[in-house]
Structures are given as structure tokens and as C-alpha cells.
Image: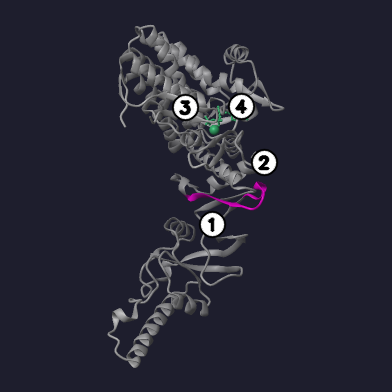
Amino acid sequence: MAANAVRTTAGPMFIVGDGTRTRGHDAQRWNIAAGKAVAEAVRTTLGPRGMDKLLVDSSGNVVITNDGVTLLEEMDVDHPAAKMLVDVARTQEDEVGDGTTTAAVFAGQLLARAEDLLEQDVHPTAIVEGYAAARDLALDAVDDVTTDGDVDDDRLRDVARSSMTGKGTGDVSADALADIVVSAVRRVTDDDGVHRDDVHVRTQVGASSGATSLVDGVVVSEEPLGHDAAVRVEDADVLVFDAKLEGRETEVDVAYDVTDVAQLDAAMDAQEAELRRLADAVADTGADVVFCTKAVDDRVAAALADRGVVVYEKVDGDDADAVRTATGARLSRDAFDVDADDLGRADEVRVERFGEDAATFVERADAPAVTVFARGGTEHVVAELERALGDAVDVVAAAAEGGVVPGAGYAELAAAAAVRDGAAGVHGRAQLAAEAFADALDVLPRTLAANAGMDPVDAMADLHAAVESGPAGVLLADDRGVLGDPVEAGVFDPAAVKREAVEAATEAATMIVRIDDVVAAE
Ligand code: ADP
Ligand code: MG
């Protein structure tokens, strides 16, 4: 029997067996249990003092992570309701790039409370109605605590730092990384907003994470043909070519009916001449560096090298696009029809070697694309750093566009208070569900407190009192949890992250509560 299981380091956690059909309350209970189990698995990773999880997948690969969505994706989740929770984290990651643990824990809490309500014979439709009303109240509350006006660089650095605290970022300081991330996002911001996709994150093992830097331009993993030594071209004209640089026919005996040696020589000569013309055409464009997405004939490469042109072949499509954006080159397909306008410009194209690997830096002072070049001592460190940086870029972009809210649990506390106030206006038994929604929101600051080693009951009592007079949350002092003002401490999250968490978690929980028939099929 292939049991459906959530596998964590604690061993398999069986949720539901195959070949069963469950209906009505039983189905709801199974689903809720499955969803809760998934949420529970990530609860201890929430916040700056969250624990890392070590996961081993079925092929034996080890992942160490503090990232909610990575954790959920790596877990072997195989139950429809549990999968929905994983989808909440994935949606959260795709939409805003952070808050995955928050969303999953919150969804799990909504399910746990729905279970209690079902026990009290509250009908699923009343739960759905109450949760929807509460969600709207919570979203309004998030808007209310969102800072007005433009978000300045200091505040963006706060957001970057908050998103990275507690994540494995090696020995580099969160301040240094926050600086890099904010500079990167500012570089790709114009009147149209933030061009998030023009911030690239590249990793390279072999140095400490303190060597992480911001590159004006792009870094591609390719290396040029025929160059073993260092390559460095200054003030480079760059051609990005999207067709083969080869003769029309590479097989001599296909093109010519070869009957004697003289004819063969003539055929070869004709082909040599053609390749020579092709190489000359490419060189005559004025390009110093050619990034070709297709194959380049050795003889063309050699002829270009003779004329001092650096050539790359079979360049990955994404890399070619990145080079185009960074240099302003247009894609060319015909070597005999390239204008000066089609060429891009780079201050420098440089190949650097890192042990076995090589990378090409295409830099320009005002390049519209930038790259965070992340370093780390091991694959684990760079992988975690890459995730943390990617998320930080996402949240800084979201904060620059949609504003920020005080973090450390304050946004959730404020939302819970607003929902509790507004619940009085919700009719019938749905009111119970709205109140339950507020309690579920409270679990986020409570979990932050618990993960920071505080007594969660005392902390919540103090927090409820403190938020009456202003922002309050769970902060860290000397690595221990203390209550304080997140605004003073500079702990902020993008408003979009909190909005998305509320929306995604409510949607998933209400969907799961509505299901009352489960057929487990092969
Ligand atoms: P998520 O996947 O939900 O982003 P995290 O583990 O990143 O989970 O924790 C996010 C929570 O931790 C947010 O509520 C955020 O405000 C809070 N947080 C981040 N940094 C700090 C900090 N330095 N002090 C207190 N809270 C913080
Ligand atoms: Mg986070």
C-alpha cells in the first residue's frame, strides 16, 4: 500500500490510506487533519529564531532550509487537502516571495478552528461566510497599518533585513546583504515601477558569503571558445546572434557528388571560402564579443579569433536575453544584415575562473539589468543564500510598490483586533467563525513568541494590552525574545505579503472545509 504521507525528519506521518472513500464529517476531519499536519511541520521555522529543518528527499539529497515554501515543496506531501496547503505556500512565494510560513501556519489554524466549529455543529457554509467577512475586515486593518507615501531606502533595508533574519546566509552581515538588495532594486526602478525580472541572482561557491557583491550588468555561466586564459574586453560592442554560425552544409558528401580528389578539394575550398565570408561578415559588424545561441563552426571561431573577436556558442536562451537587456543589443539572425543599432554596448566583458567553473561578467555602469553575485563556502550555503536573496529582492520590490507594515507580529495583532471588533456585525453562527478567525491570526505572534523562547500565554496577554496604545510585537534582544515596538526596531514587512497571506490562507481553508467527499484513487 502506498500510503499518503508527509515525511519529515521526525519520520513518516501518515495522513490517509489509499483505496478509501470518506464522506461528510469524516471527510472533513481527514482533510482538516491533513492540512493541520502540514502547517504544524513548518510552525517551528517561523520568525527570526525559527529552527532550520533538515530534509532528505527520496533520492537522498539533503536540503537545509528555513524557508517555508522550500520546506513544503521538499516534503513528500500526497493528500489532496495537504497539497492545497502546499499550494498556499507556493502561491505566496510566486505572488510576493515571502510570508510562506505565515500563510501556511495561518491556514492550518483556520482549519483547526473550523474543526472545532464543526464539532459544535456550525454548518460549513456558516464557517465559510464568517471567514470571508473576517478576511475583509483583516485586509482593511492591514491597509490601516500600511505606511503612507514613498518608502525610503532605510525602510527598504529594514524590510530586506527582516525577510533575511533567521535564514541561513552564511557569515555575511544582514546589513551588507540588505544594502546590496536595495541598491539592486533601485537600479531597476523607473517611472513604470520596479522591473523585478531585471534583478538576477547568481551563485558561485568557493569564497565566503562576505564576498557577495552587486554587479552592474549580468553574469552568465558560459565561457568563450578557444580561450583558456583570462579574457577581458573593454568598451565592447556586443552582438547577440540567434542562428548557427556554420556552413550551409556541414557534410561535404551530401552537398557534392564527389567522384575524384580534385572535386573533393574544390568542394572543400568552396566551403572554406563560405565559412571565411561568414566570419568576415560577423567581424565586419564591428562586434568585439559575439554571444551565439546556436553552434559555431570551429573554423568560423578560429577566423574570428584571428580578427580579435571573442565568441561564445550555444549560449542559454535566458542568458542571451539577460545579455541583450544589459547591453541594449538586439537579436540578430543574419550575419550579412547587422546594423550598428543591433549591437549592444558593455564597459567590460570579462571571464573569471573559479576553480573548475568560469563565469562571464558583462558590465555597464548604467545597465538596466543587475546581478547579485552570491558567494558561499559550500553548495548548501549558496543555495540557501540564493533563496534568501531572491526572497529579499521580491519583498523589497513589493515594499517599494505597495508600502510596508510593522512586522514582528504587529500586523496580525492589529488585524485580529479589527476582526474581533467587526465580528459583532456578522450575523448568526458565522459570527463564531469570524471570532475564530481572529484567534487564528493571534497564533502568528504567539508562535513568534514561542519560537523566541518566551512564554506564549504571558506574551499574548502583554501584547494585547500593548497594542491598545501603538505598534507592539516580538523582538529579539541578545538573541532572546522581548516585547517591543517593531517600528523603533526597524522590523517591517511588505503590506502585500500580509495581504496575500490572509487571502491565500482563507481561500485554501474555506475550500477544504467545503469538501465533504473524498475518494482516494490510485
Ligand atoms: P515567513 O515565511 O512567513 O516570512 P519567517 O520565518 O520569515 O516566515 O518569519 C516572518 C516573521 O518574522 C514576520 O512576522 C516578520 O515580521 C518577523 N521578523 C522578521 N525579522 C524580525 C526581527 N528581527 N524581529 C522580530 N520579528 C522579525
Ligand atoms: Mg520570511
Q: x, y (%) of residue 438?
A: 47, 15
Decide if residue 57 is in sight here. Answer: yes
Question: For mark 1, does the 10 Å Cα neighbourhood hold few (<14), some (14 to 19), or many (20 or more) residues?
Answer: many
Residue at 41 percent across and 68 percent down: it is 295
User: What's drawn in magenta, residue-wise?
Assistant: 198-212
Question: For mark 4, does the 10 Å Cα neighbourhood hold few (<14), some (14 to 19), or many (20 or more) residues?
Answer: some
**Which quadrant of the frame does ligand 1 lie within?**
top right
Whichever of labels 3 and 1 marks the residue nearer the N terminus, that label is: 3
Give the CA distance from mark 3 to mark 1.
35 Å
Q: Residue furthest left?
A: 257
Q: x, y (%) of residue 502?
A: 44, 25
Whichever of labels 2 and 3 marks the residue nearer the N terminus, that label is: 3
Instruction: Residue under label 2, please give it.
Output: 173
Whichever of labels 3 and 4 marks the residue nearer the N terminus, that label is: 3
The C terminus lies in quadrant: top left
Instruction: Residue under label 3, please give it.
Output: 104
For ligand 1, tell me if the residue under mark 2 lies within 8 Å: no
Taking the image as shown, residue 208 lies to the left or right of residue 70, namely right
Whichever of labels 4 and 2 marks the residue nearer the N terminus, that label is: 2
165 or 150: nearer the viewer? 165
Up/down of 148 relative to 339, above or below: above
Instruction: Residue under label 4, please give it.
Output: 487
Q: Residue furthest front?
A: 1
